[in-house]
Image: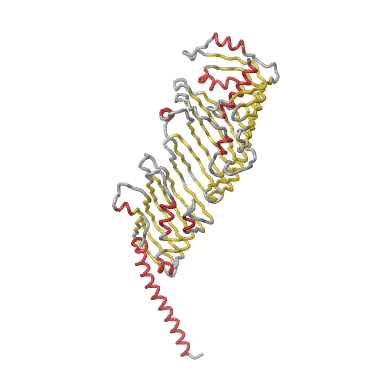
Amino acid sequence: MTVKVYKKMLLGVLTILLVVFVLNILLNGWIKHQLPTIINEKNDTSYFITYKKLEVSLLRRCIFAQNIVVVPKSSLKDNISKKGIYANIQTIEIKDINVWNLIFSNKIKASTIGIKSPNIIVYDNNNHYSVRNSVVAPFEKIIKVSNILLSNGNLKVLSKNEAVPILSVNNINFNLEGIKISEEILNKKIPLEYENYTISCDSLFYHPNSFYNLKTNKVNITKNTTQINNFEMIPAFSRREFVSKLTNEKDIYTLLCKSISLKNSNWGFRGDDFFFHCNLITLDNVNANIYRSKEPTDDLSKKHLYNKLLRDLKFDLQVDTLKVQNSKLVYEEEKNSEIGAGVLRFNDFNLTATSLNSGFKKEKLSDVKIAIHCKFMKNSPFTVNWSFNVLDKRDGFKIQGKLGNFEAQQINAFTKPYMNVTTKGILDEVRFNFSGNDLKSSGQFAVQYDDLKFTVYQKDARKKKNKVLSFIANIFVKDDTKDKITETTIEVDRNPEKSFYNFLWISVAEGLKKILL
């Protein structure tokens, strides 16, 4: 091959490189000029987008923007009646862009979009926010990507109707991979499909209604697992304020939980039907308080048993195992705020429940089985085994329990303020084995006790003994069972206006009454 041929080849290569270089400059300039048109002039979404810096590199096939601001177009004319998304974003980097798609379709198509340090405020004046209509659909008109990587973000959802945010999340890190969006997908309940995702945040605050606030520290979520640290569900008011706002009796819940974990979970929609399935949910170190004031008007509505409550859920729930471990439960009931509440305590509380299902579109289910091990009033070992079937329309259940070595005066924390009665003595063993349904319960009750005594106090001077009533009570009560278990059978009718736990208590009380008197 001659030198002349080499020179021609070299000249051809240089010419091609020069043409590519010139085309790159021209396309770079054209795209950089075209992007503002795509983002705003040809943007038929409800949002206006600005930025301070924009860089385009066709060789690296990426777009880099800095100091981005997103506001609703409506806010340009009315900045008082805020609604929609307001965002300030430090940087956005779009990688592996499709150049020809950008030139010919006025849409940015790429593999990945990286969003750093977004501060997002959502104004939701109706407390009803549609991700499909307000987020996915509008921005899908501008950009289509397969992966979204968001780091160091902050989110607030605000409402004019509430003094506190509906939702506040700090330091969000979010990866969504394998995104698919189409007209068909946009019409589904979840308006996008994906292969995998991870979400984490440093803290979360949620205000679901005017009565409660939910808080967490660190949260980590993947497609199949969830880990939540230091969960809190706290009343938004003091007990007195809360009770003053109630029209009927209602429990007030305070729930603190050091750790909540979900393993092998899956959720979504099958057609229009929502489902949530999980292999294992574990709540560790729960501190739960349930308080009820008897001052508001009685709630006379029917209280359904757990069979029906689960049976009537309008979605497919399946939790194979639920565990509550290393926990504490306190129940307080107060007739009068001046007297104080009666208190029942369950320490070292451990619960395992299996086969928790809703009845939604199901024809056969295994029994729900619940096993509880705890210390009643701090010291006495208490075990319960409880089972029922969700699909049983008679709401049948079986429950058996055993309490050992109980010093009767420990119950005074409940009976003194609530019943104006104290007791002393030893309950060596209490056993019950009941079966029932929505109408009645029956079964066996057994107890062994020693030297049981009652003291009744005066109604108007609650620190003074009512000697007459105390004397009468102790005449009629058998003070011991002669070192042996005494058994009886019970049968009681259910008050449908009361809870399952009231039903269990009156069944136990019936057994005590038959043996003690």
Question: At 41% across and 57% down in the image, what residue appears?
Answer: 139
Q: Position of residue 374 (x, y in %)?
A: 61, 31
Give 139 or 376, whichever is nearer the viewer: 139
Give 330 or 83, whichever is nearer the viewer: 83
Question: At 55% across and 47% down in the image, what residue appears?
Answer: 275
Please say if 283 is above or below 73: above
Please say if 299 is above or below 313: above
Q: Position of residue 172 (x, y in %)?
A: 45, 50
Colour treatment of the image: secondary structure
The residue lying furthest to the top in this view is 468
Disc count in the image? 0
Please say if 240 is above or below 270: above
Q: Position of residue 492 (x, y in %)?
A: 61, 23
Quadrant of the snapshot with the C terminus: top right
Question: At 37% across and 53% down in the image, what residue appears?
Answer: 88
Give 356 or 164, whichever is nearer the viewer: 356
